[in-house]
């Protein structure tokens, strides 16, 4: 039953997010300069509401799930995965897309899936909260991307970092059910459509180290920069972050400027651009990858709800498109696939998940070995730049707050 609810929630969230993003682009086309006001004010409002009432709804949602699984405090887990947080996550991620943030709904769907299973476990009096939370997270990925194997691998590689016992059956069953619900409603689709890219000649394989190096450096830079801004900011950023709404407004203004300058390319989840590049081999503007990277970093650092998955895939596709005029001897679609998986693997430092998620989203089995090589090399390079995986580093902010010693004397004493 929990997995059915996860599938339904993921489908509803996907439809809501699509409508929210379409609304932003309609506003941008009708009133070209309005985002200069709407986006900063939207960031301010979302950051304030999040910090004031729903702090566990900030950002991607995956760090919250990691923190919840590491916690032994039921009240702390409830604060991270409660129904109020889940509803706030869905609504405010959609609103973030309405105001032009560069965020996705796939990471938040992980938190939504974990919250649904946590609620089911609590309602049914089941003690295996950790296993069910893990299963709900995996089911969220499966339903969000129509990528069941990636959901299982994500649970193993990123959330659990280990795997044992009967949880195996729970995770696989939850992924199958949630993925089946999504399939029944949306059909058996490939997230980006069916891609048919191949690397036939020996020279084509030179693209693997090239994409791994660039993707690894850029992904590692993104992870380290985001961790630094949110956890160990330099003094001038730390001063701004003392007023979260002001900092969010500045981030929103820069995102708005990028969005207007790029005709909306810098905003949203990047799905359309990624699909055009991977499926059709279309050349994306040379500035797309860097502008999307900056907009995504600022959107994530601002403290508003929203995920990194689809924007990161979009950045990778954009960086790959930048290479196509230089590496002309490789199929542009293959080049963009390699760069997409390389950058994404470097950001999350989960190479197997990156490979399988891209394979399942594109229905392309021809590129398995080069994708694996690129992902492993890129993740290794990223670890040299950013020692701690991004989501695990960010999860520390959601650890249990230290308790005051009840035995200490009060002010009245």
Image (cartoon, helix red, strand yellow):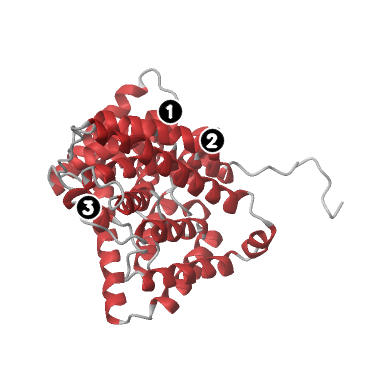
Res. 76 image quadrant: top right
Q: Which residue is mark 2?
A: 384
Residue 140 in picture, x, y percent from top left: 31, 42
Residue furthest to the right in view is 413
How many neighbours does mark 1 have within 10 angstroms: few (below 14), some (14-19), or many (20 or more)? few
User: Does residue 362 sit above or below 19 in this rendering?
Assistant: above
- Along the horizontal axis of the image, is 220 left or right of 375? right
Distance between the Cα atoms at labels 3 and 1? 42 Å
Nearer-N-terminus badge (3/1): 1
Q: Residue at x 40, y 43 (%)?
A: 215
Nearer-N-terminus badge (3/2): 3
Q: Secondary structure at mark 2?
A: helix
Q: Residue at x 66, y 59 (%)?
A: 238
Nearer-N-terminus badge (1/2): 1
Distance between the Cα atoms at labels 1 and 2? 39 Å
Res. 366 image quadrant: top left
Q: Which residue is mark 3?
A: 275
Q: Which residue is mark 1?
A: 127
């Amino acid at each position: 039953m929990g997995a059915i609810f996860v599938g339904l929630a993921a489908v509803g969230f996907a439809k809501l997010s699509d409508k929210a993003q379409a609304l932003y682009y309609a506003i941008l086309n009708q009133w070209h300069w309005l985002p200069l006001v709407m986006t900063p004010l939207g960031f301010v409002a979302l950051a304030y509401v999040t910090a004031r009432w729903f702090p566990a709804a900030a950002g991607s949602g995956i760090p919250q799930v990691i923190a919840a699984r590491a916690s032994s405090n039921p009240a702390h887990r409830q604060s991270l995965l409660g129904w109020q947080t889940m509803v706030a996550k869905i609504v405010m991620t959609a609103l973030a897309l309405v105001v032009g943030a560069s965020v996705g709904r796939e990471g938040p769907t992980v938190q939504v899936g974990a919250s649904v299973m946590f609620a089911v476990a609590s309602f049914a009096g089941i003690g295996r909260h950790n296993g069910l939370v893990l299963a709900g997270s995996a089911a969220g990925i499966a339903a969000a991307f129509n990528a069941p194997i990636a959901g299982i691998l994500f649970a193993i590689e990123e959330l659990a970092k280990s795997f044992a016992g009967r949880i195996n059956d729970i995770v696989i069953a939850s992924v199958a059910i949630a993925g089946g619900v999504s399939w029944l409603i949306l059909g058996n689709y490939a997230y980006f459509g069916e891609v048919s890219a191949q690397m036939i000649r020996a020279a084509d394989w030179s693209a693997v180290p090239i994409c791994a190096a660039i993707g690894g450096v850029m992904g590692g830079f993104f992870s380290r920069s985001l961790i630094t801004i949110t956890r160990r900011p330099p003094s001038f950023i730390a001063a701004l972050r003392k007023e979260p709404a002001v900092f969010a407004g500045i981030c929103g203004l820069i995102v708005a400027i990028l969005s207007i300058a790029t005709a909306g390319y810098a905003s949203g989840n990047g799905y359309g651009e990624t699909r055009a590049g991977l499926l059709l081999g279309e050349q994306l503007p040379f500035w797309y990858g860097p502008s999307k990277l900056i907009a995504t970093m600022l959107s994530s650092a601002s403290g508003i709800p929203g995920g990194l998955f689809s924007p990161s895939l979009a950045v990778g596709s954009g960086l790959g498109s930048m290479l196509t005029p230089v590496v002309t001897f490789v199929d542009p679609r293959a080049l963009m696939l390699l760069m997409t998986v390389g950058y994404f693997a470097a950001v999350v430092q989960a190479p197997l998940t990156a490979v399988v998620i891209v394979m399942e989203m594109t229905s392309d089995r021809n590129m398995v070995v080069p994708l694996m090589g690129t992902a492993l090399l890129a993740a290794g390079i990223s670890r040299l730049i950013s020692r701690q995986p991004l989501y695990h580093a960010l999860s520390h902010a959601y650890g249990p707050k230290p308790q005051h010693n009840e035995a200490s004397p009060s002010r009245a004493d």
